[in-house]
């Protein structure tokens, strides 16, 4: 009886574009592989595809790994069946290890057992659950059924302003809010979160830069139109506090919001998306990208490596297939004293943002605009829509509000 080498069979599929599409649709995770050489070949193909837009052919792979004697041949197993076999193997082998590991880690503190089991269960569920995103010519019924479901669901979560929601039909996929440092990126993000709560949604906001309590109070001040500086300077009067309390009660009656700041070491894409969705989030906000960690547990802003940016952004893109994700990001130093809206190539990790985002919005203002508390909010890149720019006004001294006041036509 011939025993299949599952890892090798997966490697044999890596030059086939149709198989690669299934691998991407299924959110295949190379942790399922036990053969380190095959895992290296997989990562080589993944990097080649991300950088070149196409898979390497068999000759390229064999040349790259000739010292290891890699030879490619046709696979004996259909790719969908193979991925499921790999998942089953991982579940069998790693399930036992997971139970033993959890038991050992919690032996001195049994109160953490339930939490540890839940976290590991969620991780395994996301890793092992089939995605079922592949379509072929016979799948009209499945495709039109998904369309009708989307019609019933209506537009996506709010982008924070009626004007943007009408134009883009709400959020879908992966949205970036990009600006220079101290350009109100976080405030525009809080504004979007607030509008989603008002609409009855359940946004989950990761405040990775600011303390969670400060971001929470930004939301409440914005809802109540109470100057945030009065909170910072401990100058809230009775009227301010009453307004914040009243609007907090109103918000609680509309929807649900969670503002979270996980510890360092727990900020991978898999972790933050999993935790938010386990909590029932219908849209996820990340403020901001540079604090998200790669698969080695290092913040991408610390390495500033384009490969790390692509890894994290591509993971966010994959997860955004199942629900919108909004991510705050920065332009690089080249935008200092810019006299117009910066361009895509001036974004940190710009290639990954351009390739993976559904929509990237930029914030910009010149010196004269800042004197009048005005900003331009415009499309940097969009998968489904044309370029458009709006003018927004930020009022923070006498109140706490952000409004779009018109479309920029120049």
Image: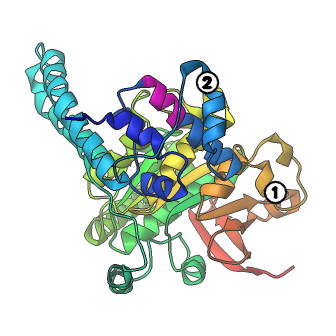
The image's mark for residue 117 is: none
Q: Residues within 10 Å of mark 1 (few under 14, many from 20)?
A: many
Residue tagged 1:
342
x, y (%) of residue 69? 54, 23
Give the image quarter of residue 95: top left
Q: Is residue 184 left or right of residue 73?
A: right
Q: Position of residue 342 (x, y in %)?
A: 81, 57
Q: Nearer the viewer, residue 145 or 243?
A: 145
Where residue 104 sits, quadrant-wise, is top left
The residue at the point 35 percent across, 86 percent down is 148
Residue with the mark numbered 2 = 66
Crowdedness near tag 2: few (<14), some (14–19) or many (≥20) residues, C-alpha within 10 Å? few
N-terminal of the two: label 2 or label 1?
2
Secondary structure under badge 1? Answer: loop
Q: Nearer the viewer, mark 2 or mark 1?
A: 2
- Which quadrant is the N terminus positioned in? top left
Of 13 and 351, the residue lying toward us:
13
The residue located at (53%, 70%) in the rendering is 160
Q: Nearer the viewer, residue 224 or 410?
A: 410
Q: Main secondary structure of the magenta part?
A: helix
Q: Nearer the viewer, residue 356 or 330?
A: 356
Placement of 148 over or under 218, stated as above or below: below
Q: Is residue 39 magenta?
A: yes
Q: Is residue 271 visible?
A: yes
Give the residue displayed 60% in from the left and 82% down from the top. Answer: 167
Q: What's drawn in magenta, residue-wise?
A: 36-42
């Amino acid at each position: 009886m011939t025993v299949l080498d599952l890892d090798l069979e997966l490697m044999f599929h890596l030059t086939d574009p149709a198989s690669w599409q299934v691998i991407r649709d299924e959110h295949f995770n190379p942790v399922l592989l036990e053969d380190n050489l095959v895992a290296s070949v997989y990562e080589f193909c993944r990097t080649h595809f991300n950088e070149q837009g196409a898979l390497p052919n068999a000759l390229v792979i064999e040349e790259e790994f000739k010292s290891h004697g890699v030879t490619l041949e046709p696979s004996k197993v259909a790719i969908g069946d193979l991925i499921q076999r790999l998942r089953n193997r991982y579940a069998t082998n790693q399930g036992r290890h997971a139970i033993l590991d959890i038991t050992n880690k919690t032996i001195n503190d049994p109160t953490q057992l339930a939490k540890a089991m839940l976290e590991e269960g969620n991780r395994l569920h996301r890793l092992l659950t089939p995605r079922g995103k592949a379509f072929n010519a016979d799948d009209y019924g499945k495709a039109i059924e998904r369309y009708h479901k989307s019609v019933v669901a209506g537009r996506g979560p709010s982008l924070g302003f009626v004007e943007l929601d009408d134009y883009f039909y709400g959020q879908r996929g992966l949205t970036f809010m990009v600006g220079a440092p101290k350009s109100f990126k976080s405030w525009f993000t809080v504004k979007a979160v607030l509008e989603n709560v008002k609409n009855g949604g359940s946004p989950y906001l990761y405040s990775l830069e600011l303390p969670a309590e400060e971001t929470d109070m930004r939301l409440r001040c914005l809802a109540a139109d109470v100057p945030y500086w009065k909170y910072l300077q401990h100058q809230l009067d009775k009227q301010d506090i009453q307004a914040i309390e009243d609007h907090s009660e109103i918000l609680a009656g509309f929807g649900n919001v969670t503002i979270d700041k996980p510890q360092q070491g727990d900020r991978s894409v898999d972790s933050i998306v999993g935790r938010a969705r386990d909590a029932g989030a219908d849209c996820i906000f990340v403020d901001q990208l540079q604090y998200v960690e790669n698969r080695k547990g290092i913040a991408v802003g610390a390495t500033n490596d384009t490969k790390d940016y692509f890894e994290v952004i591509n993971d966010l893109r994959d997860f955004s297939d199942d629900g919108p994700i909004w991510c705050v990001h920065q332009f690089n130093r080249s935008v200092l004293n810019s006299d117009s809206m910066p361009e895509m190539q001036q974004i940190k990790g710009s290639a990954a943002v351009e390739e993976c985002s559904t929509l990237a919005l930029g914030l910009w203002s010149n010196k004269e605009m800042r004197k009048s508390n005005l900003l331009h909010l415009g499309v940097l890149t969009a998968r489904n829509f044309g370029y458009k720019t709006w003018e927004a006004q930020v009022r923070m001294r006498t109140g706490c509000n952000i409004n779009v006041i018109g479309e920029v036509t120049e």
